[in-house]
Image: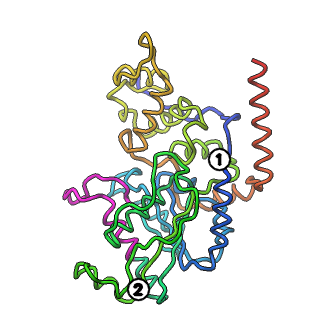
Amino acid sequence: MSFLPRHAFPPLPSLPRSYFLGHHKSGLSKMKSLLSTIDLVIECRDYRVPLTSRNPLFESALEGKERVVVYTKRDLGGGARDTWNEEVIKDWHKGTTTLFVRNGSTQDDDGKGEYAGRKSVAKVLDVLRDHARARWKLVGHRCMIIGMPNVGKSTLLNALRAQGISKGKVAATGAQPGVTRKVSSGVKIVPSEDDVEGLEPGMRGKLTGVGGGIYLLDTPGVFIPYVPDAHAMMKLALCGSVKDTIIPPVMLADYLLYHINIQSPTLYADYCGATNDIVELLSAIAQKTGRLGKGGAVDTEATALWMIQRWRTGQMGRFLLDQVDENALEKAKVVEEGVAPSMNQARRLEREKRRERNRARGER
């Protein structure tokens, strides 16, 4: 009998729908206050969730400011030659420069083993230099990098700095969201056109006309005040935009299994045969990897977190969680306008949900 994956995931009525924290709110406020001093905004989105990782708050808070949209973690969303999704996404942003950055460290398509993100980061630097040349400033060009929590802003900043001025890591990064809590002061990523001492001859030519150099401000990730769609919340949790303690790991692993089975159940063939039962899969993984508790009992929570992390690093499939098509962005905007509440409404709804969950626990 052939395996049939689930055609839908069960409803999630009690799922938390917010992760809007104090440093998100203060960070957004600080961004707004600095906007008049910023020449260009770099908005990062996760390529695996190109729709779900866009934050409508930025549309209103940064309205009118020129921006570049950078989709990070491109290597985790499919093969390098799978470019159809890229073309559709670029079409969503007509008139806005749209770039894709590979965050992994696998071999390039030419097989030379070069850091996979190096070429894509170089393209971002080229765009920033061109922008600086068109708006020459003696004091330098100031850019600000923004995005949802854990979409790779600090990783991109470090990569731009490494290639732009050959300096080491300056922004802290981590597997969980919330590493960056404040808006940073400007970090130099491209030297001034006069600062050529010690640079390779090829790099000196790239500085012509950039004025006082290019500086980039890192910012904390800002979450959506309220996520109207439970599936969107699960996708963001899978991609690491909320802490792993917010949604039960086994539930999250089950949602991942649902998506993996749509792609191909062979992605976990090393552990067990095709299944829609997450407990069966986690038990098989635990037996094979030794994630067992006292008496040989399966540690389902630890195994679920291990499975999720494997997917996050591309070791259990590389695919998008969002459906990408020509009209997807417009559909998402219509949904937001129709159901997305204000921040105050979002807080009230979340408080009510917490009370309901506490009452349910008390009745058990």
How would you classify the magenta stretch by its main secondary structure? loop
Question: x and y percent of residue 155 in the render?
Answer: 42, 58
Circle on res. 301: none
Q: Of residues 280 and 116, which is closer to you in this image?
A: 116
* Up/down of 119 relative to 141, above or below: above
Residue at the top extreme of this rendering: 295
Residue 113 visible in rendering: yes
Give residue 234's quadrant in the image: top right
Question: How packed is label 1: few (under 14 Cα within 10 Å), some, or many (20 or more)?
Answer: many
Q: Which segment is the magenta one?
A: 101-126
Q: Of residues 194 and 208, which is closer to you in this image?
A: 194
Residue at 50 percent of width and 33 percent of height: 253
The quarter of the picture where the N terminus appears is top left
For the residues labelled 1 and 2, the Cα–Cα distance comes to 39 Å
- Residue 242 is inside the magenta segment: no
| Residue at the spot of label 2 | 210
